[in-house]
Amino acid sequence: MSEYDRSSQRSHKGKSDELVFMALGGLGEIGMNTYLYGYGPPNARSWLMVDLGVTFPHESEPGADVVLPDLRYIVADRKNLVGLVLTHAHEDHIGAVLDLWPSLECPIFATPFTAGMVKTKVGEAGRSAALPIRTIPLGGRFKAGVFDIEFVGLTHSIPEPNGIAIRTPAGLVFHTGDWKFDPTPVVGKPHDPEKLKSLGDEGVLALVGDSTNAMRDGRSASEADVAHTLMKIIADAPRCVAVTLFASNVARVASIAEAARKSGRTLVVAGRALHRIIEVAKETGYLPESFTYLDQQRFSDLPRNKTLVLCTGSQGESRAAVARIASEEHPDISLDKGDLVIFSSRTIPGNEKAVSKVQNALARIGVDLITDTDALVHVTGHPRREELKDMYAWLRPKLAVPMHGEARHLREHAKLARACGVSETFTIVDGEILKLWPGQAGVIDEAPVGRLYRDGNLIVPDVEGPVKARRKLSFVGIAVVSLVLSRRGDVLGEPGLVLEGIPAADADGDSMREVVFDAIDGTFRSIPPKRRSDLSMVQEAVQKAVRAAINEAWGKKPVVKVLLSVVEARG
């Protein structure tokens, strides 16, 4: 036990302190990673947040740009939030910082590359106020309130992935972030087994760990293996080569640039995200200052068989470079029959249709494709089962809390942890508050959680928000009825009617407009003239009648809006 631990335990002795863990995102899902550690008595806990990320919308969330965690629980107690620690710079760990930090107003701690990425995002967004980011050196140790925090370098698919050693009066918790064990990561240093073993010797109360690949046997391949494969494929290609990848994978960018150099090709970069990553990587030393490339406008000036294009859009994003190239809409870059596109990435679950659409469009042009099912052009950034076993052997935690995964990943991770000798494992979901210390660990409470959406320039709620309304519209359409009434309640003129997303006729061929008009007419005939002055009653009656009539004709209940206006009768 460190002197910090002993002195802190003395100062808190006699108080009903607890150490708890919970997530506002990231448990039971992949993405939107937002975790909280709380220490102190239940009514006055000091909180530490680890990561504040986004996930991407499903088809059932039309129009949403990204999905963010609902922070209402911690916002209500933000006076006790001592800081936000960022493990690394992937969007599912930092993507919500710009939008949601104003509701927290706490210090932010990050290592140089991650800090650089956040600052770049601030600049691109045109924010006038800088975020209070405290840049911590690699391997650095600092305090935030009662928490003593140390960055522990690991390897992943982005520079500076950090595990977080969180020392508290209750003991040490190791929060892995995203990680793998790669002895040859191309960029950055490999993991340090001795450092992890020393943490295990110190004593680890709980390991809160990445579960993404807990179902996959063996070990993840090295980034150096991908570099070798790309080098050969690019060298052997007879015509133009384009590679699309996760922009944040600086090691892959470096490998592709080296393959271009050795094969005598000029590197062209297409996509704003890649330009941003490259510049931050140069500023922080992960790419040399001499790293050179041409912008996309120069593509047409180059011989095609001596060009290598690095482009965004590996997940099928409709406005990214490779999608625009595939649809032959890119302003500067075009591909022809016999050219080669390498998808140096994996398809994130949920993006399969979008990626397939882009790949089929490229195939129709006559472009050859290579994906990770054809060759070793991508490796995971997450640990497989043998790497997880090593982590447990070195840290020897008393408790294991799987995170960063869907329910099946968390469950499989928990089973593996028990097989590694961990006595207690907990597969909890977002919002459940897990007591780690003192006494028997277990779920002791539940906090409100939810989803927010970035919808254009606005942050909107999930429940009763515009995205939910659009979801309903996408399934059942909308009928808008406009009625002009006299003060006596008579309908003046023919009702106005707009039907969107609703069939024009029923199964017998009868016009849906006539179905609606008949419903309106029947409704007014059923309401005594003296009662028609109650406009809200009339509006509701027409709405219900129209909805029921369309449902009878179509078998679906649309959204129905009724607009009423009252004027003096003419003549």
Image (tube, rainbow, N blue to C red):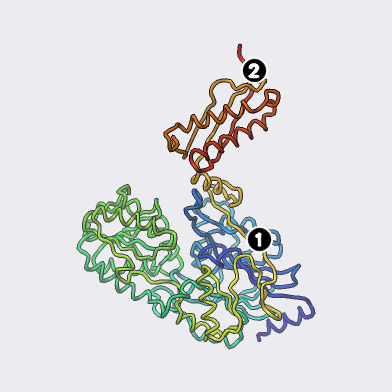
The image position of residue 165, as x and y in percent, is: 59, 77
Judged left or right of residue 281, residue 68 is: right
Judged left or right of residue 427, residue 75 is: right
| Residue beneath disc 1 | 448
The image position of residue 179, as x and y in percent, is: 48, 74
Q: What secondary structure is marked by label 2?
A: loop
Of residues 166 and 504, the one nearer the viewer is 504
Q: Residue at the spot x=51%, y=60% of the render?
A: 55
Residue at the far front in the pictured view: 508
Q: Can residue 459 be spotted in the picture? A: yes
Placement of the C terminus among the 4 image quadrants: top right
- Specify the amino acid type for callout 2: Glu
Residue at the far bottom in the pictured view: 201
- Specify the amino acid type for callout 1: Pro
| Residue beneath disc 2 | 568
Residue at the far right in the pictured view: 14
